[in-house]
Amino acid sequence: MIVSEAIVKILEKENVTAAFGIPGAGINGLYKYLAKSGLIRHYVHRHEEACVHAAGGYFRASGKLAVALCTSGPGATNFVTGIYSCNIDSIPVIAITGQANTSQLGKDAFQCVDIARICEPVAKKTYCVTDPRKVAETFREAFRIAKEGKPGPVLIDLPLDVQNADIEFDPDSYVPDSFENPSPDKEKIREAIGMIKAAKRPLLLMGGGVLLADAAKECIRLAEMLRLPVITTYMAKGAIPVSHPLNAGHCGIQVGQPIGNKIFLEADLVLGIGCRFTDRHTGDVRVYRGERKFIHINVEPHEIGKIFPADLGIVADAKKAVEALIAEAEKNDAASRWDIADKIPDLRRELSRKTDYACKPINPHRVFAELNRYFGDAAVFTTGCGITQIWSGQLQEVGAPRHYLPSGGAGCLGYDIPAAFGAAVATGRQTVAVMGDFGFTFHVQELAVCAKNKIPVIVVIVNNAYLGLIRQNQKYAYGYEYGVEMAENQSIIDYVKVAEGFACYGERVFDPSDISAALKRAQESGKPAVIDIICDPAVDCSMGTALDNVREFVY
């Protein structure tokens, strides 16, 4: 069997049904047989980076792995940012790149670049397959590595002569590798329950690993048993319903919320599950740690103690760990006596940031209030980077797992639209990409992909005519402003025409009372849509350098 045909059979055996890619001379050997698959639907993109973002969005929304494909040279190097974005957020994707013939490797042949070596620092694993006989074992291992433990992207580089080689391969003999993530040490689980019982003010911190392990329901049950306030990291947004009486919001120096920061700073013990303790969450680590104790549960041993030592570290799959904690808690009366648990609903109302602005130009906070009212939990949201992404994290109310898909660790402009496309393909849900006017121009060409495939992604532009986050950093950290003003984005630049040029619906909104109706018209158009909302350029975003010094702005 030709290697490329064998690869397609392997993808089918691995239950891949979606591929996001761009064909090219270096990968056409594989595309010949991909075209014959009756199980895999292929979507042609307009930029290689977008292929990886779409495959990542597909997994984030559904929990099902997809593949991204592209040709060699600049096609392959365009994969790098997408692979990095997936890797830092623990998103498994199989990225397949074409390559020159094996005899040309290292000889500066046309569009021949060592992409496997380039991607080594930003992928979970990379391969360049030069022996056709090793294709099956390479793919089997790659799929297992992508999914097991802390997930991540795996790149497989395929020279053209390897793609076209003839090998002995029986598809019926191919069996995907099985794996089992670690179970927790029982003694450490008992110790954890003992620490929670002894604490006066314990809380549960849910990280993105909880969603990856599909353990949100179990975490909520544990919190209810132990009466623990639940704080979510940014990557876990949506893991607990907004209205749940134990939902204490987010904690952090940017996408944190006043209620989350307040309750965290009052806590004396943190049960952190599937989290990383990264800088935008912790801020000043000295303030974050304080005198409180930390129990850190993570499937990846190297994550525990990476930022600061845990008082108790437990290496385990999040769901297995939480189930073990529940079982142990059932044997003990470990419920917290901290009275904050009864006050959370009231605190959530009292400490919520103002969003009901009626001014023109529109205050960006109002945009998110309208999104909350109009969509509720019916839509899946994506967002990339910048001041709009931070407002989104602070102000959007998302109450269902896998409904909020941010570019977390990378903060990648251009992630939003292709990720929303992938999420819509995976789930069939309404997807909404929320971004700033500058970020819109990164991978805007992917609107054509949405239109061609009749995927009605809605793009909401919070148009403040600035590089808003960079303006704010210049203003408060350095006392100057330069190179960040983009008044043209509210005047001579017409994003409605851009939308219409890509066969999408477009509308510009000037009055806050018109936002909801514009969203309704976008949905009723049946097309991908761009809603360009003209906002006040001067509004700042609440943030700080530590949990105890977040500066709030009210207008």
Image (spheres, grey):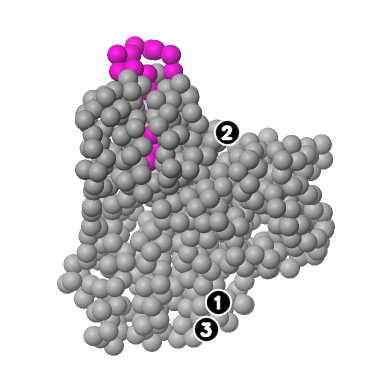
Using the rendered image of the protein, determine whether residue 31 is visible from the camera's viewpoint. yes
Instruction: State the SS at label 2.
Output: loop
Relative horizontal placement of residue 467, taking residue 116 as reference (left or right): right
Instruction: State the SS at label 1.
Output: loop
In the rendering, at what x and y percent does residue 81 appear? 47, 36
For residue 230, above or below residue 405: below
Q: Closer to us: mark 3 or mark 1?
A: 1
Q: Closer to us: mark 1 or mark 2?
A: 2
Instruction: State the SS at label 3.
Output: helix
**Mark 2 crowd level (few <14, some 14–19, many ≥20, 10 Å Cα):** some
Could you tell me which quadrant the N terminus lies in?
Answer: top left
For disc 2, the marked residue is 46
Q: Amino acid at mark 1?
A: Ser
Relative horizontal placement of residue 185, taking residue 444 as reference (left or right): left
What distance separates the C-alpha of mark 2 from that of mark 3?
50 Å
For disc 3, the marked residue is 343
Q: Closer to us: mark 2 or mark 3?
A: 2
Contact, CB < 8 Å: mark 2 with mark 3?
no
Q: Amino acid at mark 2?
A: Arg
Q: Which residues are magenta?
A: 94-111
Choose top left, top right, bottom left or bottom right for residue 453: top right
Residue at 60% of width from left, 40% of height from top?
449
Q: Which mark is residue 6?
A: none
Say whether residue 360 is magenta: no
**Mark 3 crowd level (few <14, some 14–19, many ≥20, 10 Å Cα):** few
Say whether residue 98 is magenta: yes
For disc 1, the marked residue is 243
Relative horizontal placement of residue 63, taking residue 393 as reference (left or right): left
Using the rendered image of the protein, determine whether residue 470 is visible from the camera's viewpoint. no
Q: Amino acid at mark 3?
A: Lys
Camera-side residue of 538 and 419: 419
Camera-side residue of 155 and 37: 37
